[in-house]
Image: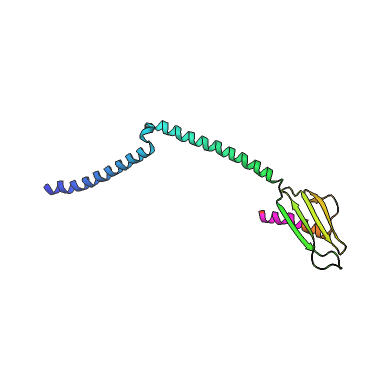
C-alpha cells in the first residue's frame, strides 16, 4: 500500500510544480502589464491602449497630409533632365553645341540650346508645357525632349 502512495505522490508533486511555475509566470506577466503605479485595473490599461492608438492614428493622418503636400510641391520642381551634345555645323570641330531639357513632374519646363559656330555662340530657350513645345523644335531638341520624358517614366515603373 505504501508503494501506491509513493507512486501517486511523485506525479502529483511534479504536476504541482508545473502549476506553480505557470501561476508565477502568469503573475509576472500581469505585473508587467499592470505596473503598481497604474492601479492594476484592466479597464484603465485598455483606456491607455485606446488613447495610444488614437494618438498614433492622428499622427498618421498628419503625416499623410504633409506627405501629400510635399508631393504636390515636388511636382513643380525640376525632376527630369537630359542633355545631348552634337555638332550642327560642318565647319566646327567637336560636339560643343548642346540641348538641355529641364522638366518638372508635369513635363513642363524648358529646353536650353547652345549652338557653337566659328563666329560665336547662340543660346536659345524654348518653353515646354505638358511635354509639348510652343515653337518648332530641331531634331536634337525633339530627341532630348523625348528622352527626358521617357527616361523618368521608364524608371518609375
Residue located at (88% from left, 62% from top):
119
Scheme of colours in the image: rainbow
Q: Position of residue 60 (x, y in %)?
A: 56, 39
Residue 150: say if magenta: yes
Instruction: Please indicate, yes or no, whether residue 157 appears anywhere in the rendered image.
Output: no
Q: Across the whole image, how many numbered discs are drawn on residues?
A: 0
> Residue at the left extreme?
1
| Left or right of residue 57, residue 30 in this image | left
- Secondary structure mostly seen in magenta is helix
**Residue 85: x and y, percent?**
78, 62
The x and y percentages for residue 102 are: 75, 52
Would residue 2 be found to the left or right of residue 115 on screen? Answer: left
Which percent across, then down, holds residue 11?
Answer: 22, 47
Residue in view at x 83 percent, y 54 percent: 124
Q: Which residues are magenta?
A: 146-155
Judge whether 33 appears above or below 4 on screen: above
Instruction: Residue at the far right: name it.
Output: 119
Magenta span contains residue 39: no
Between 128 and 87, the one nearer to me in the picture: 87
From the viewer's side, name the closer residue of 152 and 16: 152
Examine the rendering and report whether any part of residue 25 can be seen: yes
Q: Nearer the viewer, residue 85 or 130?
A: 85
Q: Quadrant of residue 25?
A: top left
Residue closest to the eye, 3 or 141 = 141
User: Residue at image x 25%, y 45%?
Assistant: 17
**Quadrant including the C terminus:** bottom right
Amino acid at each position: 500500500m505504501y508503494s501506491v502512495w509513493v507512486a501517486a505522490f511523485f506525479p502529483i508533486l511534479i504536476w504541482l510544480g508545473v502549476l506553480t511555475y505557470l501561476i508565477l509566470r502568469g503573475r509576472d506577466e500581469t505585473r508587467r502589464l499592470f505596473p503598481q503605479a497604474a492601479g492594476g485595473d484592466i479597464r484603465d490599461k485598455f483606456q491607455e491602449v485606446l488613447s495610444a492608438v488614437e494618438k498614433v492614428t492622428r499622427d498618421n493622418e498628419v503625416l499623410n497630409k504633409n506627405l501629400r503636400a510635399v508631393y504636390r510641391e515636388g511636382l513643380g520642381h525640376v525632376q527630369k533632365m537630359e542633355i545631348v551634345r552634337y555638332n550642327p555645323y560642318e565647319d566646327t570641330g567637336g560636339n560643343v553645341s548642346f540641348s538641355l531639357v529641364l522638366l518638372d513632374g508635369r513635363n513642363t519646363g524648358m529646353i536650353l540650346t547652345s549652338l557653337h559656330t566659328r563666329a560665336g555662340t547662340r543660346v536659345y530657350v524654348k518653353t515646354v508645357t505638358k511635354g509639348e513645345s510652343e515653337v518648332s523644335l530641331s531634331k536634337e531638341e525633339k530627341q532630348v525632349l523625348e528622352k527626358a520624358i521617357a527616361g523618368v517614366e521608364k524608371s518609375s515603373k
